[in-house]
Image (cartoon, rainbow, N blue to C red):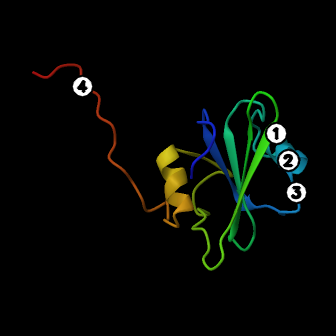
Amino acid sequence: MKMFVEPLAIYLYKQPVDFRKSINGLSAIVEAEMELPVFSGALFVFCNRQRDKVKALYWDKTGFCLWYKRLEKNKFKWPRNLNGSVLNLSPQQWQWLLEGLDITLMKGHQPLHFSSTI
């Protein structure tokens, strides 16, 4: 997905959301249920009960942006069996989710940190 901004963080809300909710309703979920600051510049990701639609909400310093995607045939592989109600996603995991991959099964290489080469 190409976005106009690079979010500071990406948070996925695991529970299905009524997609009649728009910016105000989703903002309320971010603050009340996710307990995160909606004006942080992070991307907040929601899915409907059928898992064929995704909404992403973010604040871009001048107003809210709401991004929406509807699948015509398939369903998103929405993670449900992980602990907690909110997941912090990497940009790669967000891309995998949009491409239809199960992010609970996908694991990239872990970064290594060395202090010396000898």
Closer to the eye: label 3 or 4: 3
Residue drawn at point x = 57 percent, y = 48 percent: 2
In screen coordinates, is 3 left or right of 46? left
Tag 3 residue = 21
Of the residues shown, which amino acid type is indicated by label 4? Answer: Phe
Closer to the eye: label 1 or 3: 3
Helix, strand or loop at mark 3: loop
> Mark 4 or mark 1: which comes first in sequence?
1
> Mark 3 or mark 4: which comes first in sequence?
3
Near mark 2 (Cα within 10 A), the count class, few <14, some 14-19 or many ≥20, is: some
In screen coordinates, is 3 left or right of 54? left
In screen coordinates, is 24 left or right of 64? right
Quote the CA–CA distance across marks 1 and 3. Answer: 14 Å
> Mark 1 or mark 3: which comes first in sequence?
3
Helix, strand or loop at mark 2: helix
Looking at the image, is 101 positioned above or below residue 117? below
Residue drawn at point x = 56 percent, y = 52 percent: 1
In the displayed orientation, state which residue is furthest to the bottom: 73
Quote the CA–CA distance across marks 3 and 4. Answer: 47 Å
Give residue 114's mark: 4
Quote the CA–CA distance across marks 3 and 2. Answer: 7 Å
Q: Which part of the image, by quadrant, shows the C terminus?
A: top left
Tag 1 residue = 31
Looking at the image, is 71 positioned above or below residue 44? below
Tag 2 residue = 23
Of the residues shown, which amino acid type is indicated by label 2? Answer: Ile
Looking at the image, is 100 positioned above or below residue 8? below
Helix, strand or loop at mark 1: helix
Quote the CA–CA distance across marks 2 and 4. Answer: 44 Å
The image shows residue 29 at horizontal and vertical percentages of 82, 47
Near mark 3 (Cα within 10 A), the count class, few <14, some 14-19 or many ≥20, is: few
In screen coordinates, is 95 left or right of 28? left
